[in-house]
Image (tube, grey):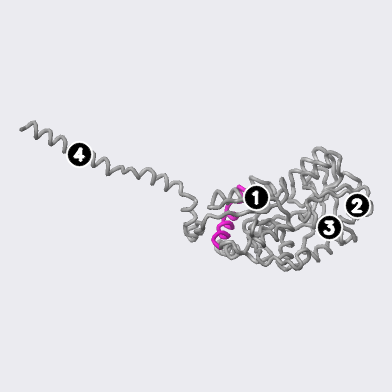
Amino acid sequence: MKKILLVVLALAMVLSLAACGGSSAPASSAPASVASETPSSESASAESSSAGGFKEMDEAYLTLAAGANGGGWYIMGAAFNDAWEQNLPVHMTLLPGGGSSNPSLVNDGTDVQIGFTYVATAVSAVNGQFEFEGAACSDMMALGSLNIKQFLAINTTEDFTSVEDMVANPGKLKIAVGPRAGGNEVMFNRYLETANSSLDALASAGADVQYISTNEGLTAIKDGILNTAVNLHAPPMGSIVEALASVKMSFIELDATAAQAVCDKYGYGYGPIPGGTYQYQDEDVNTLYDTVLLVINKNIDDAVAYNLAKVLYENRDSFVAAYAGLESFDPAALADCGIELHPGAKAFYEEVGIL
């Protein structure tokens, strides 16, 4: 009888200990701890904006139109897409594009929802002016200004002293001007108007005009195929620095009176690429410039636009690390766009006090 009682007591103690152990460490506790340390993008997106988080949004597939492959906008676009995908439930696609062609694509919104352009171009697009006459981009709004001045640089290995000299001697001119409808081609053509010329007119008069990217143009100069390249960029541009290490090129300054006439008509600025920015460029080179802008289709959900703007505002350091041309990017200037802001982006900029 005593043996039976001892066995029963022993069994009771084992069961009691097992029950205590199970209640102190339930099977679900470890995964719950991991989940709290590394929240999913979906749970992060659901946080209250008043608590410093993102607006709740559905998973989204978006396409960003940048510039030519290998150019500054393309590199910036890749950096922005990476940041958006790392912080939001979005899947981004990057496409090459152009400053003058992107607004129409964004306005349509079918294949492209976000794009790079310039402030002056965006104003023309919204108002249906110049190349947008009869095709106003009424469904395009601003996502944010990058506050980056991109200057029209004209580099040559020939003995040209001015654009007017090129116009007077078209047979000597072998020039790369960037893709058609790109910012390079459009701005340069607008300056040529002051000399009663155009790229088509120069080609008809014997100039070799190539509509190729900046990188391709500079490579062609190094190879002796072309002698001049036109490009819009935020100095210093790596491909120009690299080209100057191989071949000596001069920088062509634009005539102040002619340039001001272009500014008055199209809304550009006129100012210097500071002396010493590049090898063989000891003095300031005055030229046209415009400010880079991100535009977005107005039908994009407000929460999505809010979150895209928030990521731009909070990740300057990673952007500059990806592309030195973003050094002048100032998050405090994101709301200075020249055209109407998307309501979602506007709400974020008001919330952080920059609007």
Pick out the residue farthest to the top.
3
Residue closest to the eye, 82 or 280? 82
**Which mark is first along the chain, 1 or 3?**
1
- Distance between the alpha carbons at the discs numbered 1 and 2: 36 Å
- Numbered disc in front, either 2 or 4: 4
Q: Main secondary structure of the magenta part?
A: helix
The residue singled out by tag 2 in the image is 166
Q: Percent from the top left, x then y, of residue 236?
A: 74, 47
Amino acid type, callout 3: Asn
Amino acid type, callout 2: Met
Q: Is residue 81 above or below residue 338?
A: above
Highlighted magenta segment, given as a residue range: 302-319
Q: Percent from the top left, x then y, of residue 223?
A: 84, 38
Q: Residues within 10 Å of mark 2 (few under 14, many from 20)?
A: some
**Which mark is first along the chain, 1 or 4?**
4
- Distance between the alpha carbons at the discs numbered 4 and 1: 62 Å
The residue singled out by tag 4 in the image is 15
